[in-house]
Amino acid sequence: MDTQKRAIQVCVLSDLHLGTFGCHAQEICDYLKSIQPEILVLNGDIIDIWQFKKSYFPPQHMQVIREILKLSTTGTQVYYITGNHDEALRRYSGTQLGNILLDDKLVLQLDGKKVWIFHGDVFDATTQGSAKLLAQLGGKGYDILIWLNHRINQLLKLMGKERMSLSKRVKESVKKAVSWINNFEETAAELAIDAQYNTVICGHIHQPQKRIIKNEKGEVLYLNSGDWIENLTALEYVNQAWTIYQHPVSHTKKTLPSAELAELNALKKPILPDVLGQQIAAIVGNPSAISFS
């Protein structure tokens, strides 16, 4: 194992939204290269199939998938838990390929405690039934907002001012959104307490969180892994304790090695879910076929 990598018992990532403009793919790659987890849980919305366009899947986004697969070939058990934005993969739930298991939820036993992990979109009425179309259309507007925010931050950087998050300000200014987040957390906690789990971990709402939630039946540790659009956060379990890790935003764009860039460019217009499947097949079927930097 690389001595420069941090050893982590469990790492939980969610809401990477690969295939969208707002995804911080470079920062995700940097983070994945810095850790060596025993277990890596990808808790939904990893590839954003809702917003996916064959014309936009940059090499750096493909590199994220490769970094994940690299970890799986060096001893890390990878669990891919599907979310609403990558729900097209749910028909493959239960599929095991090497050290990668694709499923809808996960229960882990950590130091005698039961941990329940799922994405969380089951609680969101806007992603169910006829409301789903509206949510997808809203997602396109969200991606435009992220693009606009990126341009504004470029200007703020030139002016020597701090970055800002338009979408975060919009959400934080709406009391209804705050109430919805609280309801989401309370609902997840109540179900976990009823099922006698010690810890419940969700994604979906892009709101990193760690707090104890109690009711008349008991208490549970509620955790949310946040996202890699605005917060750049992950959950890490080390020495019997969960912490929220926040990755710094990179202000310098890195260039991939020319040979690696050429190979990734050849794959930059995949057809989902082949974007994941072709890479897994290459790794599992012939690990030497793909080299990693």
Image: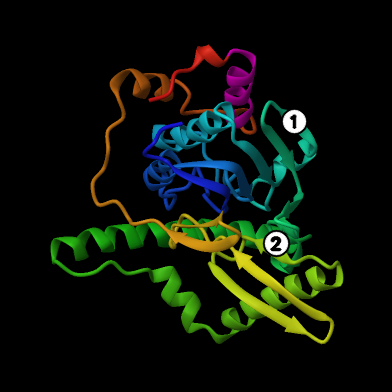
Q: Which residues are magenta?
A: 275-286
Of the residues shown, which amino acid type is indicated by label 2? Gly
Tell me whether circle 2 and circle 1 mark residues in contact (CB < 8 Å): no
Three-letter code for the amino acid on which mark 1 is drawn: Gln
Residue at 66% from the left image edge and 42% from the top image edge? 80
Q: Depth-wise, is mark 2 or mark 1 nearer the camera?
A: 1
x, y percent for residue 210: 57, 71
* Residue located 60% across and 31% down the image: 276
**Residue 40 image label:** none
| Residue hosting label 2 | 120
**Magenta residue check for 244:** no
SS for callout 1 = strand
> In the image shown, does 122 or 109 lie closer to the viewer?
109
Q: Main secondary structure of the magenta part?
A: helix
Q: Nearer the viewer, residue 125 or 261?
A: 261
- Name which residue lies at 33% across and 17% down: 259
- Which one is earlier in the sequence, the residue at label 2 or at label 1? 1
Provide the residue designation for mark 1: 96
The reply, left or right, for residue 32 in relation to residue 126 is left
Q: Is residue 81 above or below residue 265?
A: below
Q: Is residue 120 left or right of residue 270?
A: right
Instruction: Where is residue 191? Give x, y as percent.
Output: 81, 70
Q: CA distance from mark 2 to mark 1?
A: 22 Å
Q: Is residue 186 above or below residue 41?
A: below
Residue at the image point whose x is 68% and y is 53% from the top: 84
Tell me if residue 55 can be seen. no
How was the colour assigned to the protein in this rendering? Answer: rainbow
Which of the 4 image quarters holds residue 133? bottom right
Dot 2 falls on a residue whose secondary structure is loop
For disc 1, the neighbor class at 10 Å (few under 14, some 14 to 19, many from 20) is few
Q: Position of residue 136 (x, y in %)?
A: 62, 56
